[in-house]
Image (tube, grey):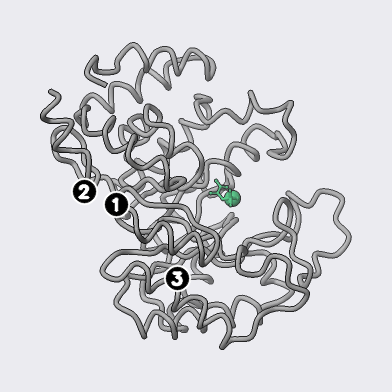
Amino acid sequence: VRKALAATGSGPGRTADDVPVALLANIATVEDARRAGALDCEGVGLFRTEGLYLGRQSAPSLEEQEASYREVLGYFTGRKVVVRTLDAGADKPLAFVDHGDEENPALGLRGLRVSWKNPGLLQTQLEALGRAAAAVDTEVWVMAPMVATPSEATGFVEAARAAGLSVAGAMIEVPAAALRASRVLATVDFVSIGTNDLAQYTFAADRMQGELAGLLDPWQPALLDLIAAVGEAGSSRAVPVGVCGEAAGDPLLACVLVGLGVRSLSMAPGLVATVRLVLAAHSLAECRAMAEAARDADDATSARAAVRALVKESV
Ligand code: PEP
Ligand code: MG
């Protein structure tokens, strides 16, 4: 067993029975990209592009954006980078984006919705990214945050393709999109589940409010049910499903997610090695059993305990 673990201490992620599960890094800045690029990971599963805009009083020009994207993508030659378009608003306000006066910013004009009032912002970002992607040897996937309906997903995919970006998808972080996953998946090339916001909106619990942490626990069985619905839609439509919220970096929960049909996990770069090891010790059937045990629980604590009881002793 020790030998097997040593053999899986590096390289692409996979289960004990060799089902590939991409292990990717979450990044937000050019500096993050430089550091993550040097690590043993399969690329980036979430580039939070608002990191490039924070602290700025005006939007960067097309050329400036293109240069930043080229630099970030350059650290991942031969690998994949999933770029999320601007997710401004709520917990990520930007000085140059007018969100208006909002009583509930988390429920307001944030994420993709910013483009309703400022279509130019998204347009320029997609164009800059399209130009950068054409100039490098990095596989570029682009996705929109806060997609709620299939038609929003379609509109985004069309805009991305018009900018020369051939792989376009949506984040699933609004319960409506998870509930109608099959229809959203019919219009995109891939989806990535944002468990942080999906938990916030499923439990009506502000992610900025510490006292609500228990409701926001990614082991909550209701959250797992929604992820399962997306995983099932992904399998039946052959559309790749990933997770890029904090849940992906919890090694046991990572196994559960794989059991629910997730095939790529994006996390804080420092967590990749542990997730790789734990995943490599469990087969897909074992991950499925873990997922079933977790969903069979009534709360996050018992879900976690039920899965712990199924973990291989070697881990
Ligand atoms: C999420 O909501 O889970 C997510 C990955 O995006 P962010 O945390 O940037 O909102
Ligand atoms: Mg989010």
Which residue bears the numbered disc 3?
A: 72
| Amino acid carrying mark 3 in the image | Val
| Amino acid carrying mark 1 in the image | Asp
Which residue bears the numbered disc 2?
A: 11
Residue at the (33%, 64%) spot, across then down: 80
Which residue bears the numbered disc 1?
A: 40
Q: CA distance from mark 1 to mark 2?
A: 7 Å
Quadrant in which the C terminus is drawn: top left
Residue at the (47%, 36%) spot, across then down: 247
Q: Disc 1 on helix, strand or loop?
A: loop
Q: Is residue 277 above or below residue 183?
A: above
Q: Is residue 81 above or below residue 298?
A: below
Quadrant in which the N terminus is drawn: top left
| Rendering coords of residue 237 (x, y %) | 30, 52
Residue at the (43%, 12%) spot, across then down: 305
Dividing the picture into quadrants, the one containing residue 57 is: bottom right
